[in-house]
Amino acid sequence: MRRLLRGAYIVWIALRYGLDELVLTSFQKPWLHLLARTVALGRNLQAPRGQRLREALERLGPIFVKFGQVLSTRRDLLPPDIAEELARLQDRVPPFPSEVAVATVERAFRRPVDQIFTRFEREPVASASIAQVHFATLKDREGRMREVAVKVLRPGMLPVIEKDLSLMRMMAGWVENLSADAKRLKPREVVAEFDKYLHDELDLVREAASAAQLRRNMAGLDLVLIPEMFWDYCHNEVIVMQRMDGVPISQVERLRAAGVDIPKLARDGVTIFFTQVFRDGFFHADMHPGNIQVSVDPASFGRYISLDFGIVGTLTEYDKEYLAQNFTAFFRRDYKRVAELHIESGWVPPETRVDELESAIRSVCEPYFDRPLKEISLGMVLMRLFQTSRRFNVEIQPQLVLLQKTLLNIEGLGRQLDPELDLWATAKPFLERWMLDQVGPRRLWRELKAQAPRYAKLLPELPRLLHSFLQQREQEGGSAASVRELLAEQRATRRLLRGMAWAATGFIGGLVAMAAWLR
């Protein structure tokens, strides 16, 4: 019954904001346009369609707001005006009562809040769709007083999420059945990705673990600060972390007045992004300005501060290598290689002509090179690439949705900090060094060292394994001829092993000499 009521409310909001008219006019059918004008009679639909969609999602609640944020990254699915409007969505959720937050903390740790913290600020400092944050002070294991931030999960989220996700899956099925183009965009898989990341956000211990992993990964880079987690005070509904003090990255004039090198800050942001993506394959995937600050403390002056690790992205080794080759080919303007990579990966049908795909990609990308960020838009480049992808039936990869979202966030930050930033020139040296490290002698040497324990255990067992195999063959064959044949095979195998041993010795000696030369 509740699901039916929720569905009815969604339909009412859709009609109130004219979303039915928006859907009908998206099809190239005159009679549907006439129907759209008919159903719009008597309603005030003068606001732009993107604005109406954004306001409807805000009325439907935090889950739909978050879905709109994810949807805004799929510029292959949306017209430009709607995508730009959805990109403006922010978590505009009022805080829940502080008494509820205190009760959640006490339930999680089974102690009064005043026994856990020496000070707990009842007024939240931040509130989002999933959780809100309170400042506090506690005494750590060494007896030191530590300033901390307490993140408390919004109560009653799981039933609401499950109900809304069920409706989203149903609507995604409808969209997928509309046309072959809609099916190519895999709306069900997009909702499944959203489902996964949303449930991950509901487990605050998972967020704490992601923050700890990013903190370890970034420890040697000296460009970004990530809060320490207090594991004695981490629970599925509450996590306690180091309090970070910085200036929001959106306050550029305040940062400039403090003496922060803004162009360097923009370049550092690009370096952090590409390091997390291509070196680690583990990246902060919610890098909007509300989650990024800059330190003005003398000990860490000018370094980024990352917050809110509920959404992180991961890439496999194959994904990293494929993307790095694509980026490198783009930066070198080797559009033929880009086309070949799309075909090799199966993103386009195997019968696609390389020269046609190469020409299409060139026409999209060539006008945007050698320009500062203020004169280009990655969103526009991606949109034109996706328009091209329709022609060639490119399969959209749902696992890369978060990467695309993060890349657009990086573009927005870079444009805000330094419109003169040349994103291509900044990223190209990093990617070329990374590619050299991946395919050069250093990669081979690392792989050999990593696999050495496995082969050291396997090699001494080879004679025993071979003897067991020959005995089994002798028992199964039984004839003298079979035995002679097996003995001959044994002698040949012994010769082969001796040859392999000599070859391996020479090969390893060459690698050792190469490694010494590289040092």
Image (cartoon, grey):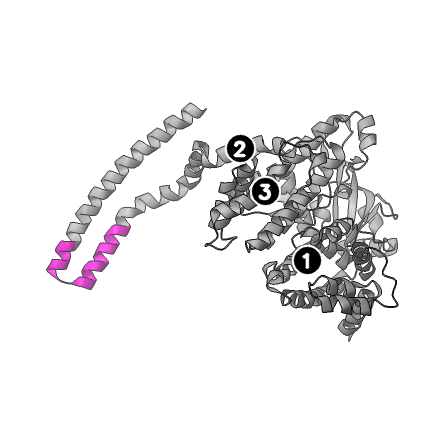
Q: Earlier in the sequence, mark 2 or mark 3?
A: 3
Which mark is in front, 1 or 2?
2
Q: Quadrant of residue 416?
A: top right
Left or right: 118 as drawn, with respect to 514: right
Count of numbered circles in the view: 3
Residue 187 picture location, percent across and down: 64, 61
Q: Which residue is mark 3?
A: 363
Mark 1 residue element: helix
Q: Which residues are magenta?
A: 465-485
Mark 3 residue element: helix
Mark 2 residue element: helix
Left or right: 7 as drawn, with respect to 333: right
Q: CA distance from mark 2 to mark 3?
A: 24 Å
Amino acid type indicated by mark 2: Glu
Left or right: 478 as drawn, with respect to 339: left
Residue 6 vertical position relative to residue 264 in the rendered view, above or below: below
- Residue 13 shows up from this direction: yes
Q: Please check the rendered image and state whether residue 380 is part of the magenta-colored stretch, yes or no.
A: no
What secondary structure prevails in the magenta region? helix
Q: Which residue is mark 1?
A: 199
What crowding class fits label 1: few (fewer than 14 Cα within 10 Å), some (14-19), or many (20 or more)? some
Residue 253 picture location, percent across and down: 83, 31
Q: CA distance from mark 1 to mark 2?
A: 37 Å
Residue 518 picture location, percent across and down: 44, 25
The residue drawn where x is 56% and y is 46% is 360
What crowding class fits label 3: few (fewer than 14 Cα within 10 Å), some (14-19), or many (20 or more)? some
